[in-house]
Structure formats: C-alpha cells, structure tokens
Image: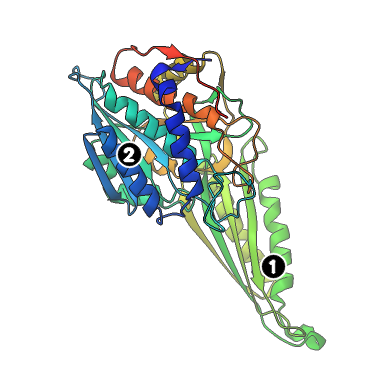
Amino acid sequence: MPVLDRVAAIQKDIVEWRRDLHAHPELGFEENRTATFVAEQLRAFGCDEVTTGVGKTGVVAVIRGNHAVPDGRTKVIGLRADMDALPIHETTNLPYASKHEGVMHACGHDGHTAMLLGAAKCLSQDRDFAGTVVLIFQPAEEIGAGAIAMLEDRLMDRFEIEQIYGMHTLPGLPIGTIGIRAGAVMAATDSIEIRIEGRSGHPGRAHLAIDAIMVTAQLLNSLQQITSQNVNALEAANMTFQEIHGGGTHRVIAEKVELRGSLRTLSPDVHQLIKNRVREVASGVALASGARIDVKFEPDHGCVYNSPAQTAVALTAAQEIVGNNIEETPPTLLGEDFATMSQVRPGTFVFCGNGDSAALHHPSFDFNDESAAYGTSYWLSLVEKILGEDTFRVAQPSRIV
C-alpha cells in the first residue's frame, strides 16, 4: 500500500531516530536524554516553537500553516506520542538493543516518538495547511502520570489545543493496517490495595489467632467471583492481583497481608459496580473471620473514548494511506493515559499494525520499522484532512533491512 512520498524520502531518518531511542531507553519522568534528543531534532526542523519541561520532561512543538483559517474551522490540533520505556530486561540481542540494563522500549514508544518526529519534519518543510499543529511528546505514560502532569502544566490552554489525536503500535495487526473504532477503545483502570490485619499467634494454638493468610485466601476466592457472577457477561471487565505480601516467620501465624492489583473496565457503571462489590465482599469476609480488611482504589486513568466526529475524519485520513486495510479493532482492557487527554478535548486514538511480533511489554518485543512509514503518513494525512486540502502525493515505502 502507498505511503506519502515525502515520508518515503525520510524513511531511513525515521528508522535511525527510532533505533537510537531504542538503544537509550529511559523510565517515566527520567526521559532527559530522550527529551533533549527530541527537542534538538524539532529545532533543527525549524518548528515555530519548541518548549521543554512541560509536565516535567515533556516536549511540545508548534508548527503553523501558511494559510489563514476559514471561519468556523478547527484552528489547532494536537498530535501526541509517548516517550518512556519500561523496567524490563531486553532479550532481543539486536544491534541497537538497550544499553541500559533492566530498561527497554517494550511498548513501542520509541517508534511512536520517531513517527511523530517524522511528521514534524515534513510539516515544517511544507506548511500547506490552515491552522496550527501542536506536537506533544509525553513522558511517563507507563506509570499513568505523564498526561496528568502535562495537563496540570496547562497543556491544552497554553497551546490552545481544540482536538487531540494519538496512535499506538499493535502486535498482531498486519503491517500497513490501521485499527480504528468510535466509542470506548481502551479500559479505565484503577490500582487496588487491600490490607488484611488478623491476629498473630502460635500454630499450636491457632484457635487464638486470626490467620491473615487464610483470610486472604478466602477473600481472593470471593473477589474472583465478582466479574463472573455480578457483571453482565456481555460487558468487559477484569480484576487481577499481581502482588501479595505477608508472613515471613516460620511457626508464627501471619498477622498482616497486603494485596495489590488492578481493575479494568470499559463502562463507568460496571466500574462502580465492581468497586462497590469489592468493598461489600471484603466487609463480609472481615465479619466472618474477625479480621480487619481495608480496601483502597486509586484511579490511574479513565477509558480512552474516541469521539464519533473525530473518528470519522481519522478514518478518512487512514484510508488515504492504507486503502481498505482498515480494521475495526475491538475494545481492549489494556490501559492508556491518553484517556486523560481525551477526557478534556475530543479526539481519536488509533492503532498502527506491528505485524507478527512479540507482545507488548514482552522482553523480546521490538517496534517494526516497516510500520513507521504508514504511521507517519497517517499523521500527515490527518493534518491535511482537518486543516487543509488533500494535496499529498504517494509513493511506495522502501524496504527496511
């Protein structure tokens, strides 16, 4: 399928940027080298404004078109990419594998950043559109804090953003395919922390103790029935526990246990139902066992919701690049803090096919460089559909080796 000829001309640059970023991953709010690299490239492209330190380590660039905005038309759109990596030891053994032990780009953020840099370079060179494009390089997506930090730094108001758009690579979706749907796309997530406090004692006199480990086992078994017994089977919901800490001394009944997990849903009503049931179940187990159980939910971010009007425009832009290779991707219980931005401005979040690769957050994952030309071309097509006339020409992407 075709990509824009201007993208084909810089495809090798995009791959070079991506592999440099991959070799030098940085965790959330530690993206100092990454932010410096991005800012230097943006200034070299000739962006009108480049602002660093937005939301701690975020970078924002402004590119203004050469044409006046007609009355009633959208004036400013935001395009967002994330920059941070994960605390995972890379096992790809690639020439450009992570040089930072225990840290790697296992979620494609290196590719997201490189594709948006590619769009920035093209837009800076040819400003044949009416309005302003704001390019947002966000930190700390993986810890669910970067979008909030940028919004608290008045991102939307400072740069007068009216609409916001995002994109994520997706393993299993073929190269040259874009996934898109209107409505709920990715899950709202909460972190869960539960503390169980019983009464310590000697195993030989267990009847005088309240075994926090046994209470925890009963609680976990009961909690797992909530999504299967209390939630409509046609609704999407998932509650899992990833950490359990308690006990530690032989021949001493555990007094305290801590559980940590996550709740993921696509419906606000289901989200609240599960939270209510978790508290009710915990209260019942506490009453039956004599233990004290404290439940705490900490919201990470809401559901990624694609506004129908913006999704329709994004679909048209995607079709210009990949033709009929459009897939209506089903909602997923993966989370994305782009949700925080889409709650304050309408927009759309799409998926760019990564082909047959390892899963996201897997130590052998690698962003597929073949997909970069399609993602970058989508960004430019989107700008053209919203802010200008469709004047781009297309060309076949070169093969990346």
Viewer-proximal residue among 335 and 362: 362
Vertical placement of residue 219 versus 120, above or below:
below
Q: Position of residue 325 (x, y in %)?
A: 56, 17
**Residue 308 appears in the rendering:** no
Vertical placement of residue 232 versus 372, above or below:
below
Q: Is residue 278 left or right of residue 133?
A: right
- Badge 1, how many Cα within 10 Å: few under 14, some, many 20+? many
Q: Position of residue 56 (x, y in %)?
A: 32, 54
Specify the label residue 256 is tagged with.
Answer: none
Q: Position of residue 329 (x, y in %)?
A: 57, 27
**Residue 301 appears in the rendering:** yes
Vertical placement of residue 183 versus 243, above or below:
above
What residue is shown with label 2? 41
- Badge 2, how many Cα within 10 Å: few under 14, some, many 20+? some
Which mark lies nearer to you, 1 or 2? 2
Amino acid found under the numbered disc labelled 2: Gln
Q: Is residue 98 left or right of residue 255?
A: left
Q: Position of residue 218 (x, y in %)?
A: 73, 65
